Image: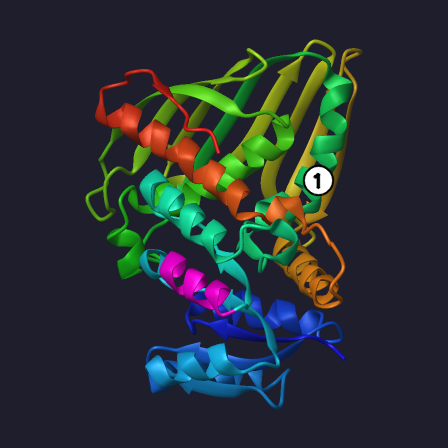
Amino acid sequence: MAPRIAILGAGIFVKTQYIPRLAEISDLVSLKFIWSRSEESAKSAAEVARKHFADVECVWGDNGLEQIIKEDSILGVAVVLAGQAQVDTSLKLLKAGKHVIQEKPAAANISEIENALSRYNSICPDPPGQPIWAVAENYRFEPAFVECKKLIAEIGDMMSVQVIVEGSMNSSNPYFSSSWRRNFTGGFILDMGVHFIAGLRMITGCEVVSVSAITSHIDKTLPPPDNISSNFQLENGCSGVFVMVVSSRSPKIFWRVVGMKGTLQVERGNQDGRHGYLVTQYGADGQSKSMFYPFSGVTEELKAFIHDISEAKKGINHVPEPRSSFLEGARDVALLEAMLESGSKQGALVHVKKF
């Protein structure tokens, strides 16, 4: 029998990603509940879900949340709420014994991370018995980044890393008016930026140890800061740059690693009407080879979570997918917080908190 799950949240991402992606793997999972704070939004999302999961129920408010918590048949819960509410809600579910996949960012800041980890470990200190707490960072599951992780050794010792993000967060973007993102410390830099940091850490297979950043606030329609330029140093000694513009008239996103024996680049784009990433490897002989990988990270991360909770139910000492761990999400946030802190101190060197 397919494991039963619930979704907390009924916003854009639930309707456009979670429900359609779960529908693609409906042979592996059963969506039992959709919850929202309001009856109207819960019913709206459930209406979308019923096209794929006929028996899904919508519940709302405190009573609806309690119903999900007390429902023994619910094995896992996807928490897709405002960033400020996610950690507390996740911990409430974990304490009740539910497995959780929580949307990124893992937390608002390092302080919240430390408090969250302390509370999580107090629920059940022994990992085999702990409910799974996953963070939904789809970039770690995108086939393009999985492939780059394999190819990175072929370019030899790293000499330079570039991450360039020229985003498209303007009034035509459905998330532009998102109130919780605007009220988040770090704004869109933190909410969007964790993706690009996850990509950086995935490709290089290396942690960043220190940063020096300059931030600015140019586009007043966006929360501050909306631009960041940071130098960083990896633990292997290689240096790099991370540049992010929240809203650009000419969007472009790429990661580029230069090595002694070649160069590896991942660039966001589309091919034959499909959105995804073009991976290009440049060899020492001047030749290059490219492969396009369509987006599938959300589906893959959900499949991993469903596999993990199914295995955990069997009572065996199953080790959950490490790419989904709360700690991985925490490391993304810690790196961005270090950059934002450096920016607030006019480029002062800041060491990244280790988790």
Seen from the viewer's position, the closer of residues 52 and 304 is 304
Left or right: 43 as drawn, with respect to 141: left
Q: Position of residue 36 (x, y in %)?
A: 39, 77
Identify the residue at image location x=67%, y=52%. Answer: 320
Residue 241 visible (yes or no): yes
Where are the magenta residues, as a range? 86-96
User: Is residue 237 depicted above or below 45 in this figure?
Assistant: above
Left or right: 72 as drawn, with respect to 8: right
User: Is residue 263 depicted above or below 37 in this figure?
Assistant: above
Q: How many marks?
A: 1
Q: Position of residue 165 (x, y in %)?
A: 45, 35
Identify the residue at image location x=35%, y=86%. Answer: 39
Q: Position of residue 113 (x, y in %)?
A: 39, 44
- Quarter of the rendering containing residue 86: bottom left
Residue 251 visible (yes or no): no
Main SS category, magenta section: helix
Identify the residue at image location x=33%, y=22%. Answer: 213
Is residue 285 found inside the magenta-colored segment of the image?
no
Where does label 1 land, which residue?
146
Left or right: 338 as drawn, with respect to 319: left
Seen from the viewer's position, the closer of residues 186 and 326 is 326
What is the crowding at mark 1: few (fewer than 14 residues within 10 Å), some, or many (at least 20)? Answer: some
Amino acid type, mark 1: Val
Left or right: 70 as drawn, with respect to 230: right
